[in-house]
Image (tube, helix red, strand yellow):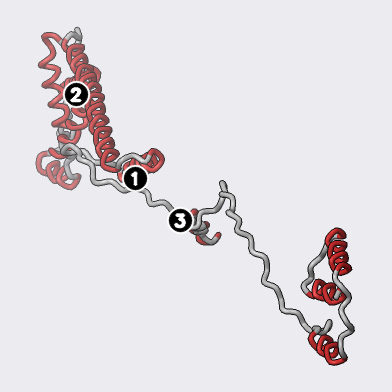
Amino acid sequence: MILFIEFLMADENISTTPLEAAAVSESAAAEPAAPAPQATETVAATEAAPSATEAKPEKPPIEFDIKPAESVLSKPEDEKAEDVKPAEEVKQEETKPVEVPTYSDFELPEGISFDKDRLSEFTKLLGEFELDSKADHAKVQGFAQSMIDRHIEELAKFQQTNLQKWEDEKSAWAKDFQSDEEIGGKRAQASIDAAHKFIRTHGGSDEQQKELYDILARTGLNNHKSIIRIFAKAANATLLSEPTVKAAPLNPAVIAKEERFYGKAG
């Protein structure tokens, strides 16, 4: 009986402590000895015992019911990796030329025009300014127009000042002529008339005389006493030395004939 219990315990893979083993032995000793089993019972018991080499059924794995800890720094499920452009594509975008802004025609006063090369340089500077500052294109156009208007205004003032100075200088030359003791004062009109006469006599054709007067007017020399003096004196010198026409010499043959008739003048 003890062997049969141990056999069952071994089959169930149950481990017992020494105390449990002693208790089992005592209980077995207290029981009266059983009569010897018959041969048939022994054979049956032998057949009922499982073979040690017989395959045992696999036990299911142990499952644990564990609640996972919350992850603080975990990757979101909906997060997607950023699209990384190929190196060649990025390089092409970096080397792509930037278009320089163009501007509409600027308004100019009548009679004023721009030098094309200098205007091109001006608009190029405007374009660089607009790209660097990222300013509004319309505002840059208006700013450029205001700069041009101011430039023309200042240029007109500058020209006005210079022209007035030139006119003042010519007026000073005229006064200087009038106050000259030799050809000015009471002799001023006579000096002017003599200068006109010299130009009419020695100034060439009417077209050439007109060209001379235009040059004198543009340069202001028509008011300068030095020019009036030289023309007036040249005219007066011509009046004092008028050229005389010489008589043509007589033909020798004619002289000989006259001498034959009238004799040689004695």
Q: Residues within 10 Å of mark 2 (few under 14, many from 20)?
A: some
Q: Amino acid at mark 2?
A: Asn
Q: Nearer the viewer, residue 102 or 21?
A: 21
The location of residue 140, given as percent across then percent down, is: 29, 39
Indicate the position of residue 154 as horizontal and vertical percent values: 25, 26
Disc 3, SS: loop
Left/right of residue 254 with respect to residue 46 in the rendered view: left
Circle 3: is it few (<14), some (14-19), or many (20+) Cα within 10 Å?
few
| The C terminus - image quarter | top left
Q: Give whichever of discs 3 and 2 has the lower sequence position.
A: 3
At mark 1, the secondary structure is: helix
Which is closer to the viewer, label 1 or label 3? 3
* Residue 14 horizontal side relative to residue 63, left or right: right
Q: Residues within 10 Å of mark 1 (few under 14, many from 20)?
A: few
> Residue 102 at what x, y percent from top left?
31, 48
Whether residue 21 is situated above or below residue 191 in the rendered picture: below
Quarter of the image for residue 131 reads: top left
- Judging from the image, what secondary structure is the residue with disc 2 in? helix
Asked if residue 27 is positioned above or below residue 257 in the image, the reply reads below
